[in-house]
Image (cartoon, coloured by chain):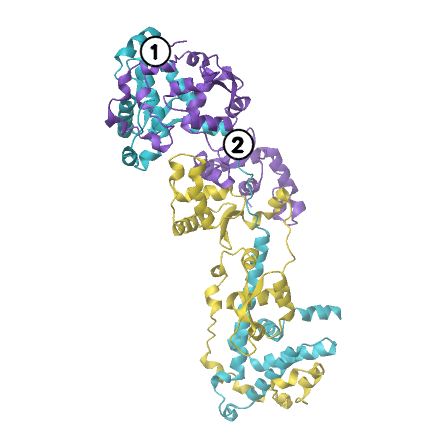
Chain colours: A cyan, B yellow, C purple
Amino acid sequence: MSEYKVKFEVFEGPLDLLLYLIKKEEVDIYEVNLTSLATQFIDYIELMRELDLDIAGEFLVMAATLMYIKSKELLPVDQQVTPEGEEDEEDPRWELIRKLVEYKKFKDAAGKLQALETATENTFARLPAKPVFDHTETETRQTASIFELLNAVNSILKRFNEREDLRDIFEDKWTVSEKIETILTRVQTSSRLRFTELFSDATSRTEVVVTFLAVLELIRLKQIEAAQSETFGEIEITPGVAQTLNHAAELAAQQPEPVGS
Amino acid sequence: MELKFVIESILFSAQKPLSPAEIRDLLKKAVEFEDSPQAGEHQKTRLEDIESALATLRDEHEQAGRSYRLLNIAGAWQFASQPEFAPWIKALVGQKPRPPKLSAPALETLAIVAYRQPITRAEMEQIRGVAVDGVMGTLVERGLIEQSGKAEAPGRPGLYSTTPLFLEYFGLGGLDDLPDAEELRRIPVKKPEELLTVDPGLATTAPEQLQLAPQESSGGQGSSAAGKVTEGPSQN
Amino acid sequence: MELKFVIESILFSAQKPLSPAEIRDLLKKAVEFEDSPQAGEHQKTRLEDIESALATLRDEHEQAGRSYRLLNIAGAWQFASQPEFAPWIKALVGQKPRPPKLSAPALETLAIVAYRQPITRAEMEQIRGVAVDGVMGTLVERGLIEQSGKAEAPGRPGLYSTTPLFLEYFGLGGLDDLPDAEELRRIPVKKPEELLTVDPGLATTAPEQLQLAPQESSGGQGSSAAGKVTEGPSQN
């Protein structure tokens, strides 16, 4: 008894039951024999009633419709009359088939949704561990810090001794501004330059220091960038953001502050 | 750095699904976090370029046929594993808490709303051929559908539509991703020509059934009607 | 399900790097989570097969050339994004490069303090060639330098030194770990009064060159570095 109940509950409604019957016949909805379908449908209703199951009103409406269709079809063709004003689109057979076709499409769609439901349940969004950045590592590796620059300058300075330096002060002809210009030209033409190359033709400590200050100034202005691929590796000088964005001209046009203290 | 790879790297590391607009904001913001020429490269990317890069990425990962995909779920993008690897990922992260699965009537009703929205309750019942009150309650309660307006009809019945949660629940990017969306939205059920001439010969096969009188819809509303329907004309 | 894809799916969803042994345990455990024939498929995989699948996966992802790789770090395997996408991933996780990165002038001033501490403001300005008020404020505020005493000089100006936080910030064990500390400490510094005598011409020469050093409006401290830059003999 409860077994039957379970079985009948499988049918969502009369259309569902009809689809089930059609499927059992293994025919296309459009080619179904409505008379035989009506008979089977009514048999089911009867069985449900005998089993004392609650029969939803919709089943009974459908049974009535089917019996009407059946009675019409039982008449020979020449006796089938189309009642006045009842055109093709109101043909109950067609109306039923149209409903069945439409319902079947949604039933199929529901099946696809069910497949999606299962797939989604088994789909796991990647939840990566929160990325962590080793601060000192990225900073020293990607952009050379002031310490690395100083370190580099310091080794260049070692080439010049103190005495030489004393002499140079008085004959020094280099200014930071000039060096800025020189470095910019070199960076623009070679696009990638080793830091030490900037000092390769320096003739005095002073020139090294002036060049270094020019480098610092250019870095600050984002005209160039100093980067080091590995700690204590060679520092490379490349055009900076401002250069890339072609802001050089704009910057050059700005009014300089008065010089001196 | 090619845009699509930048976007891919963002989604690869993201802790939650990201919309194209959120991706655009990240592309804009990157320079604040690293002062390098590369970081500024995609600062001014347009939304449609992000969307087309996302579509390219989705297709590439689809074609790569690996154990994961890039998915668009309700307009937000994320990497996710393919369903067939669920047993191992469950072993790794545990079962994911999920509401009970939807019943067949609920799925059917939901399908009708999904493809025909906005739709009234009466229209749903017409398609399903049964009342939908119970399942409607469930669907609204679970946040899968909601009333989205009122129909311009007598009594101004409520119109129902699916919610963003509906897309999420089924792993869909948008309503266009519904299976056979085009076909189902406007079902043009064509009436075949032969229909009217089906099986006239049947007129003689089952004479005993002739007693079954034509029934109008008035016949079936009473719960006691079942027996009468099979045996004779309606008593109403 | 091919073993390598199963392993891939596990690593793709894992929140931490996994060793081949941990992967083997997960392969064993999957059946407990889903009672399907597939789930048991790799239940008895040998460690060396896992290792060779991992190597295959690593090579495949290397060749795919996407924005991430499968990496073996100290015997544990994980997916990780390629370093060049760091700016965007930093923007994603909202990781400001520690409090905003120190500006070049701040770093410059900090370097001077680091190598020459304790040092007065006047001495710093003399080395840098520009006023340091702004950056000094920043450095003190960020706790990287602090006043450590007063100089035995007219007006008893404050002497500044680096703090323990400074060492931490740069990952240094102590001041002796500063690169070439010895050498740089000996770079001669001229006394401020010398400024007036050394190369005074520089202060006024080459106005056209100043156009190339337009730094002040963009954040300098109010006087140009250009004029005062020459090196002088140490007066110490």
Vertical relation: A103 (above or below) B64: below
Q: Mark 1 points at which residue?
A: A159
Q: Could one spot residue A108 in this view of the protein? A: no
- Please name whichever residue, B47 or C83, is drawn nearer the observer in this view of the structure: B47
- Please name whichever residue, B40 or A120, is drawn nearer the observer in this view of the structure: B40
Locate residue B8, reporting x and y percent: 45, 43
Chain letter of mark 2 equals C
**Which amino acid does the dot numbered 1 rest on?**
Arg
Locate residue A101, reporting x and y percent: 52, 73
Q: Could one spot residue B37 in this view of the protein? A: yes
Q: In which quarter of the image is residue A228?
A: top left
Q: In which quarter of the image is residue A220?
A: top left
Locate residue B77, reporting x and y percent: 49, 50
Q: In which quarter of the image is residue A106?
A: bottom right
**Which amino acid does the dot numbered 2 rest on?**
Asn
- Marks 2 and 1: in contact by CB < 8 Å? no
Q: Mark 2 points at which residue?
A: C72
- Please name whichever residue, C111 or A4, is drawn nearer the observer in this view of the structure: C111
